[in-house]
């Protein structure tokens, strides 16, 4: 029964097992991040912008859908890593929240156009960016992250579309 100690223990065990499976998937397929001059932005689970400084080649591979940005749930924190698209798809099947950016042809994940990116940067600078809940997804009606909700209105650009440093 939800709310009971037994239910909470079972949920905690399930989350630990999911994190372990996700971590093993990332560690087994992770692509080394090559520091470069291209800033690539993506949205974290909590709705904050993070950026990776990548080589133009790696940024292009992200834009082309060959790579994805995913969470690597380490025991004390969540880090982000680059993985091949196939590994990102496997992670998405396990946990939709684990994939932060993946340029899929039919339904891209984590895309923001330039206007959305600038608005998010301004909101974070002003301290008015809304906190996004970190609660587990509802099984019946999963919510789309803010970056996906408006991405279909116009041709999206990846967050790394311009170099800001």
Image: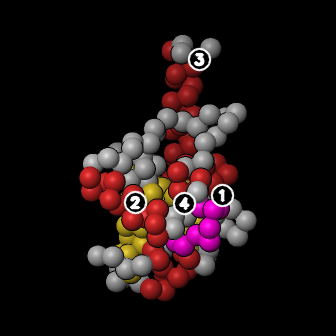
Q: Earlier in the sequence, mark 2 or mark 1?
A: 1
Q: Which residue is mark 3?
A: 2
Stretch of the chain drawn in magenta? 151-158
The quadrant of the image that shows the N terminus is top right
Q: Position of residue 65 (x, y in %)?
A: 62, 74
| Whether label 2 touches label 1, CB < 8 Å | no
Q: Which residue is mark 4?
A: 110
**Residue 156 visible in image:** yes
Tell me the distance, in whole angstroms, between the alpha carbons under discs 2 and 1.
31 Å
Instruction: Check the image and report above or below for 113 versus 70.
Output: below
**Residue 29 visible in image:** no
| Whether label 4 touches label 3, CB < 8 Å | no
Mark 2 vs mark 3: in front: 2
Q: Main secondary structure of the magenta part?
A: loop
Q: Which residue is mark 2?
A: 119
Tell me the distance, in whole angstroms, between the alpha carbons under discs 4 and 3.
31 Å
Mark 4 vs mark 2: in front: 2
Tell me the distance, in whole angstroms, between the alpha carbons under discs 2 and 3.
39 Å
Neighbourhood count class around disc 2 (C-alpha, 10 Å): few under 14, some 14–19, many 20 upward: few
Residue 89 placement: quadrant? bottom right
Label 1 SS: helix
Q: Earlier in the sequence, mark 4 or mark 1?
A: 1
């Amino acid at each position: 029964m939800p709310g009971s100690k037994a239910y909470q223990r079972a949920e905690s065990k399930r989350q630990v097992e999911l994190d372990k499976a996700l971590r093993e998937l990332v560690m087994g397929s992770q692509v080394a991040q090559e520091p470069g001059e291209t800033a690539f932005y993506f949205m974290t689970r909590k709705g904050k912008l993070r950026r990776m400084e990548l080589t133009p080649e790696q940024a292009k591979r992200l834009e082309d859908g060959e790579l994805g940005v995913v969470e690597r749930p380490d025991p004390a924190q969540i880090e982000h890593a680059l993985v091949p698209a196939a590994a990102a798809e496997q992670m998405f099947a396990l946990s939709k929240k684990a994939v932060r950016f993946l340029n899929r042809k039919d339904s891209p994940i984590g895309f923001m156009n330039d206007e959305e990116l600038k608005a998010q940067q301004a909101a974070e600078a002003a301290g008015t960016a809304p906190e996004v809940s970190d609660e587990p997804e509802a099984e019946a009606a999963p919510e789309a992250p803010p970056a996906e909700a408006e991405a279909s209105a116009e041709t999206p650009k990846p967050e790394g579309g311009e170099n800001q440093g």
